[in-house]
């Protein structure tokens, strides 16, 4: 897991403000918080916070995955070719259809057929694509793309263009000469000049001569994060970096399981050249091309310098189908073993060599393998036996990895999971009530991975009330992070045009993105997480008050991280006594996230209405008087001498 950088969030997240003059405010009675930094009561998991999402709400296609064209493998419906319109300029004449029998590969046996009966260079015919609810076009930018085509002689060249929806203005254009016969791949670039950035644009592919043109796998990319080929959207990757994650749980979620067994995340079909990926029906209402496949998930972890937590399909799908343990399950267990080899094997192994052929010779780091997802939904009761069968095979070949179970399993000798995955989607009130849920949990069994959790009341992204619920819950996870080793909020992403899940951390459209108040709470908590829990106690706050705290210590760096969550409308004055802070003057850094009401929030138009503010708190000796403002989440870093 990656080392915590708890020093500072990137400056874009923080504004530094002068300390305001003290105003009389309505407040609770003074409470006392005592911390003894010399008495460590438990270890803390400095790698607690990570990421989890899946292909939901157009998280990848139309989200993180930077490819701009929708339905770029030409799925048809009963009416037409989804997303693709017919372009007829002047007196051009043409028709389009899906040809199910002519494609560039076995995986993509279909194509879009453009039959041009009349066209000239002045009156071209072709097809257009609106992107994912628009295409963001920016000035002085190079877009790269490619397509597969099979064309009648004499149709060359093909013109590719970015066009403004409202005016029809050509924002960038280039031509590709078609060569030879049969299916060929062609690459192109589109370079914009001076223009005003917007997302109200579309893509056109046209020809100026009659004939029949077959097209498949048309791609268009803007510059990607770190200029990675087949890469990711920069604004979203930067937002993830600022979350200081330690891991990515992949590939889901329901997306791992699929509605039916045939719709599972069948990892072998998601690797290799894009043209060899058939795609599959996702469980969230749309098709996945799998152009963002297993290796792209792994590249994503590499780009963020974090580790994957690999969830393997375990023989249960969402609509109730399951694979009977024993002989029937064997191919699925073998597939999981192969998948682990693809992720971690060296180039002399079968699947390590395959990964090298796919462009990544170096194995990826791995510590955890999760067997299935939310298998408590499997009413057949087959999970304990399925888990046992996977566990036996995985532990035999890979004893070094820890296994995560997603539902209770019989703990026969050798079958016990190392970790169990607990999920929580709750209202703010329920989250406040759950903060002490793990305080008395037994420490003798498996560790806990809170693999999905979120306070859910607002949509499409959490409001400040949800952020308070999240922050309160995080204090509970931190206090118990000897037991809870890993935690990931879910889901991470929502394209605002496809809100399939109520509450999601980061919202975006084709053009821009924003972090919700909960996003900023996560950034703060993860960036300031210690590796030890010192003894502490809080008195003078009624148990029913919505005031929460956690305290962890980064022992090597000698910093105490105090988190205060005041979910009431009254300020909470505190007398904080810190044993071991050292004599003399101290300057603590305070990161503060405040919302005027529970309903206050961020939006695309007001992306940083609520964001952290940084101040400095000076005090002398070991006693500090501090008032936690109403409706505020605070992280206070106190240097120890
Ligand atoms: O995060 C959304 C969904 O919630 C996940 O796919 C599933 O695991 C859970 O039910």
Image: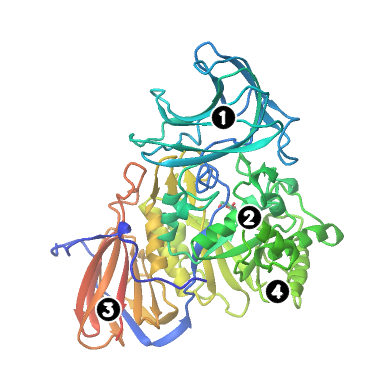
Q: Which residue is mark 1?
A: 83
Q: What is the spatial separation of the Cα atoms under label 1 and label 4, in whole angstroms?
A: 49 Å
Q: Are marks 3 and 1 in contact (CB under 8 Å)?
A: no
Per the image, label 1 sits on a secondary structure element best described as: loop
Q: Are marks 2 and 1 in contact (CB under 8 Å)?
A: no
Task: Residue 563: give its label.
Answer: none
In the image, residue 214 lies at what x, y percent? 66, 28
Q: Pointer 2 and pointer 3: residues touching (CB < 8 Å)?
A: no
Query: From the viewer's perspective, is the residue at label 3 or at label 4 nearer?
Result: 4
Where on the picture, by quarter, is residue 443? bottom right
| Disc 4 target residue | 416
User: What residue occupies the far right of the structure in this picture?
Assistant: 327
Q: Nearer the viewer, mark 4 or mark 2?
A: 2
Q: Can residue 522 be seen here?
A: yes
- Label 2 – label 3 distance at C-alpha: 49 Å
Horizontal side of residue 27 vs 579, given as left or right: left
Which residue position holds label 2? Answer: 294
Q: Which mark sits nearer the N-terminus, 1 or 4?
A: 1
Q: Which is more toward the observer, 620 or 423?
A: 620
Badge 3 or badge 4: first in the primary sequence: 4
> Does mark 2's beta carbon lie closer than 8 Å to ligand 1?
no
Q: Earlier in the sequence, mark 4 or mark 2?
A: 2
53 to 247, vertically: above or below: above
Residue 500 pos. (x, y %): 53, 42
C-alpha distance separating marks 3 and 4? 43 Å
Which residue has dot 3 on it?
576
Circle nearer the N terminus (3, 1)? 1
Tag nearer the camera, 3 or 1: 1
Q: Between marks 3 and 1, how big is the CA–CA gap?
A: 60 Å
């Amino acid at each position: 897991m990656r080392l915590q950088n708890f020093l500072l969030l990137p400056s874009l997240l923080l504004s530094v403000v002068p300390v305001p003059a003290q105003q009389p405010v309505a407040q609770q009675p003074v409470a006392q918080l005592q911390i003894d930094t010399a008495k460590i009561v438990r270890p803390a998991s400095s790698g607690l916070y990570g990421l989890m999402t899946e292909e939901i709400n157009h998280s990848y296609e139309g989200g993180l995955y930077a490819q701009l064209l929708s339905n770029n493998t030409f799925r048809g419906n009963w009416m037409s070719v989804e997303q693709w319109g017919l372009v007829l300029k002047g007196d051009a004449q043409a028709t389009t259809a899906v040809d199910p029998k002519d494609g560039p590969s076995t995986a993509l046996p279909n194509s879009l057929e453009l039959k041009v009966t009349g066209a000239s260079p002045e009156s071209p015919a072709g097809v257009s694509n609106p992107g994912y609810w628009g295409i963001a076009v920016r000035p002085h930018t190079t877009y790269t793309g490619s397509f597969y085509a099979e064309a009648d002689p004499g149709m060359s060249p093909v013109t590719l263009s970015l066009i403004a929806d409202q005016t029809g203005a050509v924002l960038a254009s280039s031509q590709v000469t078609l060569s030879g016969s049969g299916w060929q791949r062609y690459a192109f670039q589109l370079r914009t000049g001076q223009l005003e950035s917007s997302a109200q644009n579309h893509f056109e592919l046209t020809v100026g001569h009659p004939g029949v043109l077959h097209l498949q796998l048309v791609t268009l990319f803007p510059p990607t994060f770190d200029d990675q080929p087949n890469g990711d959207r920069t604004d979203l990757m930067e937002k993830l970096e600022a979350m200081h994650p330690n891991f990515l749980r992949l590939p889901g979620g329901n997306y791992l399981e699929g509605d039916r067994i045939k719709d599972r995340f069948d990892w072998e079909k998601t690797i290799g050249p894009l043209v060899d990926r058939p795609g599959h029906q996702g469980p969230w209402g749309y098709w996945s091309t799998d152009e963002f496949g297993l290796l792209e998930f792994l590249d994503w972890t590499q780009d963020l310098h974090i580790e994957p937590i690999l969830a393997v399909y375990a023989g249960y799908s969402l609509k109730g189908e399951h694979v009977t343990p024993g002989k029937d399950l064997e191919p699925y267990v073998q597939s999981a073993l192969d998948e682990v080899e693809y992720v971690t094997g060296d180039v002399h192994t079968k699947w390590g060599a395959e990964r090298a052929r796919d462009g990544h010779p170096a194995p990826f780091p791995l510590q955890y393998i999760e067997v299935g997802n939310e298998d408590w939904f499997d009413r057949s009761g087959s999970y304990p036996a399925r888990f046992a069968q996977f566990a036996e095979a995985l532990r035999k070949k890979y004893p070094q990895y820890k296994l995560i179970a997603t539902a209770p399993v019989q703990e026969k000798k050798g079958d016990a999971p190392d970790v169990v995955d607990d999920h929580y989607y709750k209202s703010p009130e329920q989250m406040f009530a759950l903060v002490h849920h793990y305080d008395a949990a037994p420490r003798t069994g498996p560790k806990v991975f809170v693999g999905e959790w979120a306070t859910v009341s607002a949509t499409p992204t959490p409001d400040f009330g949800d952020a308070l619920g999240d922050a309160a819950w995080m204090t509970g996870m931190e206090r118990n992070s000897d037991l809870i080793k890993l935690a990931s909020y879910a889901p991470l992403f929502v394209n605002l045009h496809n809100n399939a899940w109520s509450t999601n951390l980061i919202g975006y459209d084709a053009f821009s993105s924003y972090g919700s108040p909960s996003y900023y709470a996560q950034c703060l908590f993860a960036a300031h997480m210690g590796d030890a829990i010192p003894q502490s106690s809080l008195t003078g706050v009624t148990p029913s008050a919505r005031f929460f705290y956690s305290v962890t210590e980064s022992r090597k760096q000698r910093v105490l991280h105090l988190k205060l969550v005041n979910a009431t409308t009254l300020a909470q004055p505190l007398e904080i006594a810190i044993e071991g802070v050292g004599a003399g003057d101290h300057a603590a850094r305070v990161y503060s996230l405040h919302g005027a009401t529970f309903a206050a929030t961020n939006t695309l138009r007001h992306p940083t209405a609520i964001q952290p503010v940084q101040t400095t708190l000076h005090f002398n000796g070991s006693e500090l008087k501090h008032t936690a403002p109403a409706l505020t989440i605070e992280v206070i870093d106190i240097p120890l001498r």
